[in-house]
Amino acid sequence: MNNNKQAYKNRSFAVRHCRDFALFLLLCLLCVSCEKATSNDGNYSGTIVECIGNTAEQELTVTLMITNSGLNDEQWVGGAGNGTMAIDNKGNTLTPYSNMGNFYEFPTGTAVRVTVERLNKILPGTLKLQTLKVSIGTENMLEFKDVLIAWD
């Protein structure tokens, strides 16, 4: 009977610590996948929601949440002409198909879902972007490091 109690205690201890370790790993993964960046003027902050690779088109679509802490504003986001670009883990440079990007309104303190479409010329199976720079207007940039890619 005493051996059974000890075995139960050992098993409970192992299960509890495995559960704690799994939770720790999950938190680490969430932190990696939701990297944050702040613009050069400090008014914009962004978080990556997802980075999806399209195998057939060999391009990426990146979704972000961007918050403006300054006055209400309207900006073009994600245009190649304003410097939006990425570098994959093999050192290749990707640029968006669109020179202008998309136009968004940024009310003060409100998170706005933004999409940067068609970052092109990436080989399927590439695991991550070393760097992703997303332009906000002509003067601001959000820079993210080690962005993981989920392929369709």
Image (cartoon, rainbow, N blue to C red):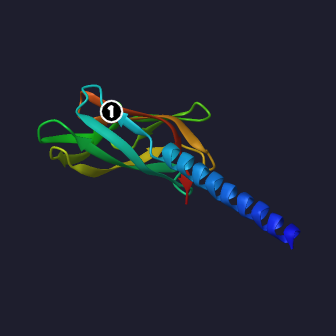
70 left or right of 60? left
127 left or right of 133? right
Taking the spot 66% from the left edge, 59% from the top edge, the residue there is 16
- Rendered location of residue 104, percent (x, y): 21, 48
Confirm whether residue 99 shows in the render: no
User: Which residue bears the numbered disc 1?
Assistant: 38
Instruction: Please identify the quadrant where the C terminus is shown.
Output: bottom right
- Rendered location of residue 25, percent (x, y): 61, 50
Position above or below: 15 against 81: below
Q: Quadrant of the rendered structure where residue 66 is? A: top left
Residue that extends furthest to the front in the rendered view of this protein: 2
Amino acid, disc 1? Thr
Taking the spot 62% from the left edge, 54% from the top edge, the residue there is 20
- Rendered location of residue 133, percent (x, y): 40, 33
28 left or right of 105? right
Taking the spot 53% from the left edge, 38% from the top edge, the residue there is 129
Taking the spot 29% from the left edge, 25% from the top edge, the residue there is 40
4 left or right of 109? right
- Rendered location of residue 22, percent (x, y): 63, 55
Position above or below: 50 against 81: below
Position above or below: 96 against 91: below
Q: Secondary structure at mark 1?
A: strand
Instruction: Please identify the quadrant where the N terminus is shown.
Output: bottom right
